[in-house]
Image (cartoon, grey):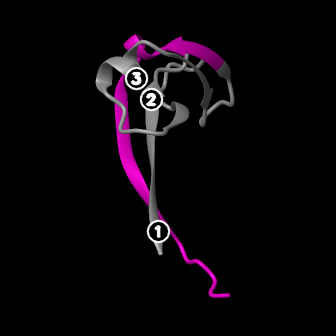
Amino acid sequence: MTDAKSYWCVVVFQCDRCGRNEAFAEESFPVEPREEQIRTKTYRAICRYCGWHLEAGGISAIEVRSGVEHRTEIRRKK
C-alpha cells in the first residue's frame, strides 16, 4: 500500500453583486500551502447565493479554510 496526500483550500470572498460572504473558490496544492501562497494568488470565485462569477485576489479573502486528503492506493498482487 502507498499513501498519497493532497492539500486543498477553500477561499471565501464577499460577493460584489449581492454583498454576501458566499463567494467561494477552491484550490488544490501538491504540498501544504502557506498563507502567503494563498494570499498572493488570484481566484475565480462563484457566489453560491446569487451565482455571480468574480475574480478576486487572495488578499481580499474573508476566510481561508484548508485541509489534507489522504488517499490510499492498494496494489494488486500479480
Q: Dot 2: within a 10 Å radius of its alpha carbon, few (fewer than 14), some, or many (20 or more) residues?
A: many
Q: Dot 3: within a 10 Å radius of its alpha carbon, few (fewer than 14), some, or many (20 or more) residues?
A: some
Over which residues does the magenta segment extend?
54-78
Q: Marks 1 and 2, Cα distance to the nearest angstrom? A: 33 Å
Compare marks 3 and 2 and give the one earlier in the sequence: 2
Residue 35, how many percent across, how many down?
A: 30, 24
Residue 77 shown in magenta: yes
Name the quadrant containing residue 49: top right
Residue topped by disc 1: 2
Residue topped by disc 2: 12
Question: In percent of the image, x 40 and y 38: which residue is there?
Answer: 31
Residue 45, how many percent across, how many down?
A: 59, 25
Amino acid type at image mark 1? Thr
Name the quadrant containing residue 61: top left
Q: Is residue 14 above or below residue 1?
A: above
Q: Is residue 66 above or below residue 4?
A: above
Q: What secondary structure characterizes most of the magenta part? A: strand
Q: Nearer the viewer, mark 1 or mark 2?
A: 1
Q: Nearer the viewer, mark 3 or mark 2?
A: 3
Count of all numbered marks drawn on residues in the image: 3
- Given the current orientation, which residue lies at the most extreme bottom position? 78
Residue topped by disc 3: 38
Compare marks 1 and 3 and give the one earlier in the sequence: 1
Asked if disc 1 and disc 2 are in contact, CB closer than 8 Å, the reply is: no
